[in-house]
Amino acid sequence: MPNIKQQEKRIRLAAKQRLRNRQFKSSISTLFRRLQQCVDDNDSAAAEAVVLELTSRIDKAVSKGALHRNNAARKKSRAAHIATSLSA
């Protein structure tokens, strides 16, 4: 246990940040599963909507510090690639 008041605060803040980061990452992986389901069902309109929501969620995660920007770019590229595989 910390003896310093500031360290107690840092532990509390880190716990909140860890929870927020986990929520971002979980929602992103859920949206990837939803996108894959749309592709499997050949539903291009729903897939486009999911891609828009997914990129928005990824950008928000980067701005909050939950994801690194290169990781986010890779995820957005992957989402676009999955969505274009539907039209091909």
Image (tube, helix red, strand yellow):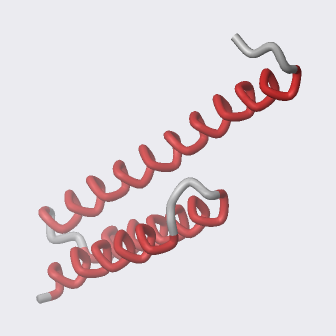
Residue 10 occupies which quadrant of the picture?
A: top right
The residue lying at 56 percent from left, 54 percent from top is 66
Residue 15 horizontal side relative to residue 72, left or right: right
The residue lying at 45 percent from left, 49 percent from top is 25
- Residue 76 horizontal/vertical position (percent): 39, 74
Which residue lies most toward the bottom here? 88
Pick the residue in front: 66 or 79: 66
- Residue 27 horizontal/vertical position (percent): 45, 48
Which residue lies most toward the front here? 3
The residue lying at 20 percent from left, 57 percent from top is 37
Residue 8 horizontal side relative to residue 46, left or right: right
Quarter of the figure with the C terminus: bottom left
Which residue lies most toward the right here? 5
Residue 75 horizontal side relative to residue 86, left or right: right
Q: Is residue 43 above or below residue 25?
A: below
- Residue 51 horizontal/vertical position (percent): 39, 72
- Residue 61 horizontal/vertical position (percent): 57, 59
The residue lying at 58 percent from left, 36 percent from top is 18
Q: Is residue 17 above or below residue 33?
A: above
Residue 29 horizontal side relative to residue 4, left or right: left
Pick the residue in front: 57 or 62: 62
Quarter of the figure with the N terminus: top right
